[in-house]
Image (cartoon, rainbow, N blue to C red):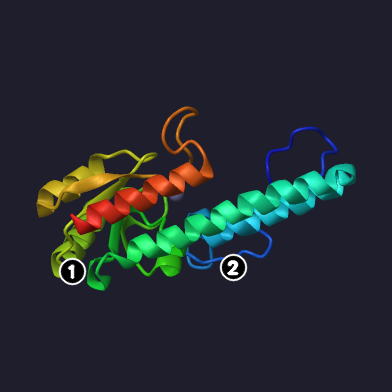
Amino acid sequence: ETAGKGSENAPVFLMSEGVEAMYLTSKGKEGEEDPHAWLDVRNGIKYAENARDALIKVDPENEEAYKQNAENYIADLQELHDQAVEQFNEIPKDKRVLVTSEGAFKYFSEAYGFQAEYIWEINQENQGTPNQITRIVDIINEKAITGLFLETSIDPRSMEAVSSETDVPIMGKVFTDSLAEPGEDGDSYISMMEWNIKTIKDGLTR
Ligand SMILES: [Zn+2]
C-alpha cells in the first residue's frame, strides 16, 4: 500500500516489502489481501527495516543515525516478539482460540499459535448479520470457548449480542486497526502490542 500523498513529488516507499501477504477467504473476497499484518511483530520488524532503508535513501548524510535508531528499535521489537511467544505458551494449546468481531488475527494467529474465529472476516457493510451471529455462536459452543474479545475500533453491539447469547464474557478490548489516542495505553506500536498480549493472556487463563 502507498501512504497519503503529502507533497507532489515526495518519494513513496512500500513499507510492507518482504511481508508475506495472507488472503481473505470469505465468499467474494477470496484473493484480497488481509490488511492486519502488523499484529505479527516479525512483520513490525520488516516495516522498521523498510523505514530505515527509505530514510537512508532520501537522507544519506544521516545514515549512521538511522541505522543506530533502527538497530535499537528492532532489538526492542525482537524482545517484544519473544515476550509474546513466552506469554502465550503459558496458555494451554486448546485454549488458544481468539474470538473477535472482525477476523483481524490471521497473521497474529499464525505467529503465536492461535486459532482465530470471528463474526465477520473483514470490516464492511454487512457486520453482525443474523447469519454471522448464528455461525459464531455455534463455533463458541462447539469449541467450549470461555472468553471473547472486542476491538477498540469496532461497534461493540454485535459482540455483546454474541456474549449474551452464549453466556461467554467479553474479556477485554484489543487493538487491531489503529493505535490508542496519544497519552493513552496503546498509543505506540510497542505499547499496543503489550496491551494485546496482556489482555489476551489474562483473558484466556482466567
Ligand atoms: Zn481491521
**Mark 1 residue's CB less than 8 Å from ligand 1:** no
Q: Nearer the viewer, residue 118 or 31?
A: 118
Above or below, 167 relative to 61: below
Dot label at residue 132? none
Q: Nearer the viewer, residue 97 or 153?
A: 97
Please give the residue where the numbered disc 2 appears in the rendered image: 20
**Mark 2 residue's CB less than 8 Å from ligand 1:** no
Q: Amino acid at mark 1?
A: Lys
Q: Position of residue 108 (x, y in %)?
A: 44, 61
Q: Amino acid at mark 2?
A: Glu
- Could you say whether the residue bearing mark 2 is in a helix, strand or loop? loop
Q: Position of residue 3 (x, y in %)?
A: 68, 43
Q: In percent of the image, x 33 and y 67: which residue is there?
A: 89
Q: Nearer the viewer, residue 186 or 82?
A: 82
Q: Is residue 124 at all visible to an observer of this figure?
A: no
Q: Position of residue 105 (x, y in %)?
A: 41, 59
**Apparent side of residue 82 relative to residue 76 in the rendered image (left or right):** left
Dot label at residue 143? 1
Q: How many marks?
A: 2
Above or below, 187 relative to 70: above
Residue 145 location, quadrant: bottom left
The quadrant of the rendering that contains the C terminus is: bottom left
For disc 1, the neighbor class at 10 Å (few under 14, some 14 to 19, many from 20) is few
For disc 2, the neighbor class at 10 Å (few under 14, some 14 to 19, many from 20) is few
